[in-house]
Image (tube, rainbow, N blue to C red):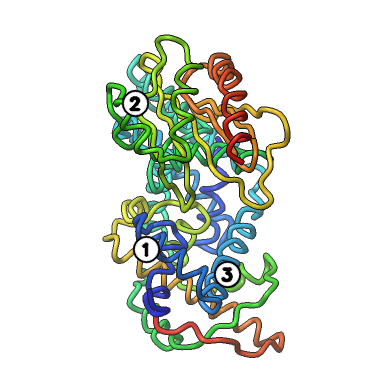
Amino acid sequence: MTCGEFLASLDAYLSQELPEDAHREVARHLEACPKCAAEFAGRARVRSALQAAVRVTPVPEGLEAGVRRAVRAQQSRTRAGLYTIAIAAAAMICISIVTLLRVRNGPEEAILRKTSGRLAALLNVGLRDHLQCAVFRKYPRQPEAAAQAAKDLGPEFAGLAPLVEAKLPANVRILQAHHCTAAGRHYVHFIVADGNHLLSLILTRKRPGESLGAGIEQSGVDRFQVVAFESHGYLAYLISDLDAQRNLQLAASLAPTVRQYLAARS
Amino acid sequence: MPHLHELYRTAARILGDASQAEDVVQETYLQAWKSFGRFQPGTNCRAWLFKILLHTIQRYRRKWLNVRMIKESEDVLEQAAAAAPAVPGQITHEEILRALGRVPADYRAAVLLADVDEFSYKEIAGMLNVPIGTVMSRISRGRKLLREQLSELARSYGIGQAGGEGGA
């Protein structure tokens, strides 16, 4: 990618509107070209300054009361009836629901945006891959052959598949195991089915500054449960749409196996 | 009413006037209430409210400003093009809002919806009732104008022109 092409894509990149391939290409150019990186940094700075400034604009005190008064006045003018009441109720629910999906690049962005707090960024690392790879891409309905999983995982991680399988309850099966990439990050990914529930066991190399500490972190995001822990230079995640308790139980039973495996190969 | 503040802030920045913004937001909720039958479940309620807001703003602007068309602002843009803006390292709220106020309203709206309210280009196209290509060019030009206005400020503070940014 030339600097000219980079500049032509920069606005769409800043808005996260580029297709995945083009996004990656721009990101690669950014790493390689300090001049373009400086241009990007300047534009990103303006964008965040604008966000910050607009978001602290004071809102008039009486605004909400005024809106409610106007809507109530409108309501009383409208013929009362079950239908009207139902519509009004639905409208108010719509207007007052906080956690609305904010669909940008796709539903996964909407879900990722709902995490907050100190660990959000780290939990999102695993959640992103689960959403992009397991939830929104095709995965086999039936478990694939163990030999295929071993081939896809490569010599480094092939040995982990049977160990994980052994730790899973009887009716919980690995559907597929492979390497994948999401948002420029590399993952080892086990897609697991528990009845109608989809689980991901995900490993990714820790980057500088990323740390989950010694324990196991748990969080619920949208309908997904995320359990995360770190071990021997890796971040590990179990993500599913199971209930929190069951997800945690499974993660707790898998964690020692994963830790031992990573310890043995480090 | 969690979207109320976002709607108000966007309206206030597009219109540049607090009391007009208040009117427009009130009207938006009234319209939303009246036309809720047309709201399709499963679609994004926040985007839907913003779409009503933008329509309301357009109606109000026609009334207040005797239709200020975008053509006009495009001329301003052409004149301003080709400069190499040096954005100040530290940008205060006041500076950026002042710079934003100097960007023509149609561009300002596109930039606000993309950069502050973080809607997708497709959603913005729906709100402004224009093709996606127009949204893209309004955002690019709007951002560029904003940088230029900021660099004007920088120059007035004695920060010299720095590196170029190339073609549009």
**Residue nearer the viewer, B111 or A210:** A210
How far across and down, in percent of the image, does residue B88 sit? 65, 77
Could you tell me which chain the residue with mark 1 belongs to? B
Circle 2 marks a residue in which chain? A
Name the spot of residue B68 as percent of width and height, x first: 38, 71
Q: Residue A191: x and y, percent?
A: 40, 29
Q: Amino acid at mark 2?
A: Ala
* Residue A183 numbered mark, or none: none
Rounded to the nearest whole Å, what is the CA distance between mark 1 and mark 3?
38 Å
User: Considering depth in this image, is B134 or A254 the residue closer to the camera?
Assistant: A254
Residue B66, located in which quarter of the rendered image?
A: bottom left
Mark nearest the camera among 1 and 3 is 3
Query: Are there few (<14), some (14-19), or many (20+) residues within 10 Å of tag 1?
Result: few
**Which numbered disc, 2 or 1, marks the residue closer to the eye?**
2
Give amino acid for label 3: Ala
Q: Residues within 10 Å of mark 3 (few under 14, many from 20)?
A: few
Query: In the figure, is residue A215 to the left or right of A261?
Result: right
Residue A41: image tag: 3
Q: Is the Cβ of the residue at disc 3 closer than 8 Å to that at disc 2?
A: no
At label 1, which amino acid type do we have? Arg
Answer few, some or many: residues within 10 Å of disc 2's Cα (few below 14, many 20 plus, some between 14 and 19). Answer: some
Reading the image, the residue beneath label 2 is A146
x, y percentage for residue B158?
Answer: 71, 89
